[in-house]
Image (cartoon, helix red, strand yellow):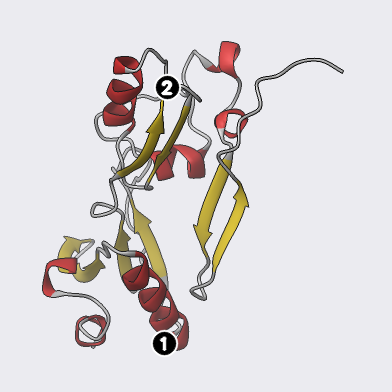
Amino acid sequence: MIADRLREVLPAEGISEREGDGRTLPVASPAERTEWVELMRLAASESWRIFTLGGGTHTASVPGEADLLLSTSRIDRVLAFEPGDGTLTAEAGATMGALGSLCEAGGYHLAPDVPSPERATLGGAIASGAAGIDRLRYGPTRAVLLGLEVLSSEGTITRSGGRLVKNVTGY
């Protein structure tokens, strides 16, 4: 049973269930990097079909072939905010509303201006390419990203870009 195997890599508070489409599916909610890596390695070794849950703003329904739901609800921390550099580093489950409030308090506007920011997550905005009317001014979501850290389905972490900002123009 999947729930039993999840207990090998996650604490009890990281495992729950969700009813839907006449069946009950296990929900894994890792909170730490090591939990995420071990979970993805376990899922790959077991060939589990995973469906990721964020804030639910782009989710119509869970696909019938899913074996496991993966929630980003416990990875919602802001890791760094540098108003002087205009950079923000946050985890995928952080809501766009919370990040927008933080940016606003620092004198910045957080793009993209997504619908339902109180539920929409950073990871979901990046994954879906979500944007609001401010896309006309600031461009698509990918235009405001300096770097990403991504966990593959095999449990490998890949990094792209970084937080380095160079605001110098010239020759």
Q: Position of residue 165 (x, y in %)?
A: 61, 30
Image side of residue 3 versus residue 57, left or right: left
Which one is in front, 15 or 10? 10
Residue at the spot 20% in from the left edge and 69% down from the top edge: 23
**Side of 74 where 162 appears, left or right:** right
Mark 1 residue type: Glu
Look at the image and tell me whether residue 49 can be seen.
yes
The residue furthest left is: 12
Q: Examine the image and state in which quarter residue 105 appears.
A: top left
Residue pointed to by mark 1: 46
Vertical placement of residue 76 versus 151, above or below:
above
User: Residue drawn 25% across and 63% down?
Assistant: 29
Q: Residues within 10 Å of mark 2 (few under 14, many from 20)?
A: some
Residue 59 at what x, y percent from top left?
35, 45
Q: Position of residue 64 (x, y in %)?
A: 35, 66
Asked if 104 appears above or below 39 in the picture, the reply is above
Above or below residue 33? Residue 128 is above
Residue 110 bears which disc, if any? 2
Quarter of the image where one finds residue 8? bottom left
Q: Secondary structure at mark 1?
A: helix
Q: Report the disc number at residue 120.
A: none
